[in-house]
Image: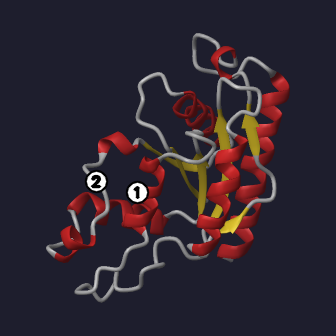
Amino acid sequence: MKLLVFAGSTRQQSHNRRLAGVVARMARQQGVEVTHLELADFDVPMYNADLEARGTPADVLRLKQIAFEHPAWIICAPEYNASYPALLKNTLDWISSPVKADPVWRDDLRATRGKVVGMLSASPGALGGLRSQSHLAPLLLTLRCWLAPEHFALGHAASAFDAAGELVDEAARRRVQAVLDQVLWAASRLQA
């Protein structure tokens, strides 16, 4: 099984980037083939149809291919103003935008259709970014993703990780593992 893990943040000390790292390590320990994506490694401009008409950026095509190759995704979504951040929306908008001149990527949902997605979030607040997930879910459904019913919002994230970047609380680890397990289980059945 190929699992794609990424956070909707590029901030150096992002709690969601830390959480994505935890998920990637947990999955690798189970023998899962993991691609832990850092969105900062891609040169992706803000989506603009005029820019797209001049040609889809090369890094967008790379992102489309990576997304397409992974039947299972886990997204760690920060919460900004009770929703998910522009970086995450922009990434998903580009991934799902058709490349009209390309016979492969003309299908706008080729990279997203049928993906099983688990949602996680982390926040210094008590709700753990839960509101970002409530806004992200309809977007993912529009992109024809399957959403894992199990999800987790890590509250009080400023004190949730140790110096090595691991979760301190065993109950939090179990909740993350439950999301991971459900995503992998569902993706293996849908892929078959």
The residue at 41%/35% (across/down) is 10
The residue at 42%/65% (across/down) is 93
Q: How far across and how far down the image is residue 79, in percent?
A: 60, 39
**Is 5 left or right of 106, judged from the image as shown?**
right
Locate the C terminus and report the quarter of the image it occupies. bottom right
User: In what element is the residue under mark 1?
Assistant: helix
Residue 25 occupies quadrant: top right
Vertical relation: 39 (above or below) 107: above
Amino acid carrying mark 1 in the image: Asn
Residue under label 1, please give it: 90
Q: Are marks 2 and 1 in contact (CB under 8 Å)?
A: yes
Q: How far across and how far down the image is residue 100, in percent?
A: 28, 86
Report how far apart the C-alphas of labels 2 and 1 lie in the structure: 8 Å
Is disc 1 surrounded by few (<14), some (14 to 19) or many (20+) residues within 10 Å? some
**Is 67 left or right of 153, judged from the image as shown?**
left
The residue at 41%/41% (across/down) is 38
Residue under label 2, please give it: 44
Q: Nearer the viewer, residue 20 or 100?
A: 100
Is disc 2 surrounded by few (<14), some (14 to 19) or many (20+) residues within 10 Å? some
Q: Earlier in the sequence, mark 2 or mark 1?
A: 2
Rendered image: mark on residue 2: none
